Image (tube, grey):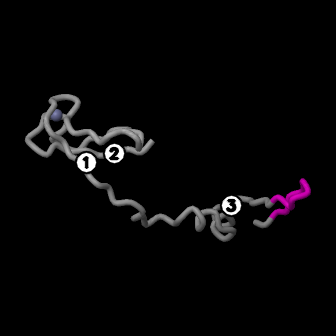
Amino acid sequence: MPIYVYRSSEHGCAYCASEFEVFQSMKEQPLEVCPHCGGKVERVIQPVGISTRPSGKALLSDKNLAKHGFKKFVNQGDGTFHRTV
Ligand SMILES: [Zn+2]
């Protein structure tokens, strides 16, 4: 389930005056009021996909695996495994 970040759009209580996170299913309506004080809140749009970490593909590249001391075995399709790293 994604985590959504909300923040009070008014004065808010101690809970919502700063940002707070809520687990919500994507089907759920966004929160409109603070669960503590009932004051109006707005969803804070989080930047997505901005990361300085290598992507999953790069993390699992043969070169990166070897660098970090992992071994990699690839299924040959006939029940045998071939070590590539
Ligand atoms: Zn509040």
2 or 3: mark nearer the eye? 2
Q: What residue type is disc 3 on?
A: Gly
Residue 15, quarter of picture: top left
Q: Which residue is mark 2?
A: 4
Residue 75, quarter of picture: bottom right
**Ligand 1, image quadrant it occupies:** top left
Based on the picture, tell me whether residue 77 belongs to the magenta stretch.
yes
Alpha carbon separation for disc pair 2 and 3: 37 Å
- Tell me whether the residue at label 1 lies in contact with that at label 2, contact meaning CB atoms closer than 8 angstroms: yes
Q: Can you give x and y, in whole percent of width and height, for residue 21 in the image?
A: 31, 41
Q: Label 2: how many residues lie within 10 Å, few (<14), some (14-19) or many (20+)? A: some
Mark 1 or mark 2: whose residue is earlier in sequence:
2
Q: Which residues are magenta?
A: 75-83
Looking at this rendering, what residue extends furthest in the top direction?
36
Q: What residue type is disc 2 on?
A: Tyr
Q: Quadrant of the N terminus?
A: top left
Q: Can you give x and y, in whole percent of width and height, for residue 42 in the image?
A: 21, 46
Q: Can you give x and y, in whole percent of width and height, for residue 30 in the image?
A: 29, 42
Residue 49 in the figure: left or right of residue 6: right
Helix, strand or loop at label 2? It is: strand
- Tell me whether the residue at label 2 lies in contact with that at label 3, contact meaning CB atoms closer than 8 angstroms: no
Q: Which residue is mark 3?
A: 69
Q: Which residue is mark 1?
A: 43
Alpha carbon separation for disc pair 3 and 1: 42 Å
Residue at 13% across, 34% down: 13
* Residue 73 to residue 13: above or below: below
Residue at 25% across, 48% down: 43
Q: What residue type is disc 1 on?
A: Arg
Mark 2 or mark 3: whose residue is earlier in sequence:
2
Based on the picture, tell me whether residue 66 belongs to the magenta stretch.
no
